[in-house]
Amino acid sequence: MALERTFSIIKPDATRRNLTGAINKKFEDAGLRIVAQKRIHLTKAQAGAFYAVHAERPFYDELCEFMASAPIVAQVLEGEGAIAKNREVMGATNPADADAGTIRAEFAESVGENSVHGSDAPDTAAEEIAYFFSGLELVG
Ligand code: UDP
Ligand code: MG
């Protein structure tokens, strides 16, 4: 399997509860390396642009409000098969469906406030990394 990079967000429900370190430990224990990371507070418009693919979904407005409600930690994770591996470590979108030991099973509060975002494919990973990080910030 190839060395890959994926984009990750530790969401406002998790930063609010001081869970950044606990979540990062899950990534590192799974063999994912945090090669870029910054804590930022998105505006609602910036959150809306990031989640534009969901603009027609009924939860879109609430999702954008939530993502702008407190700081997030934006990250690039690197590893063998990092995109799929991160999705495994995250668990299902709805924490009620997430496997035991996953981030969402342990930490998520609801289907909306579910602690982490992770890219779902190579093209979205590349787009999402470029939305948050410049090449100079990706130190490997
Ligand atoms: N979401 C929500 N209600 C839903 C489905 C999704 O509030 O019924 C939110 C949730 O925060 C989720 C995000 O929208 O993480 C993006 O949805 P997606 O289906 O892409 O899930 P993910 O890729 O994050 O597992
Ligand atoms: Mg998604």
Image (cartoon, helix red, strand yellow):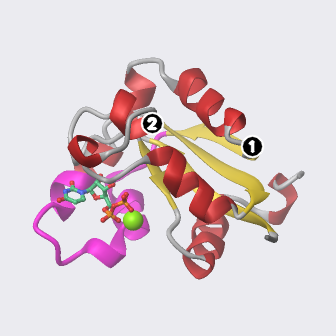
- For residue 87, the mark is none
Q: Amino acid at mark 1?
A: Gly
Amino acid carrying mark 2 in the image: Ile
Q: Residue furthest bottom?
A: 123
If you read the primary sequence from the N terminus, does the residue marked by circle 1 or circle 2 appear first? 1
Residue at image location 27% in from the left, 73% down from the top: 54
Residue 11 vs 16, above or below: the answer is below
Report the image quarter containing ligand 1: bottom left
- Magenta span has 33? no
Q: Residue at x 41, y 29 (%)?
A: 14
Residue at numbered disc 1: 31
Q: Residue 19, how many percent across, how many down?
A: 48, 22
* Magenta region: 41-63
Residue at image position (60%, 81%) is 123
Residue 96, quarter of picture: top left
**Residue beneath label 2, please?**
103
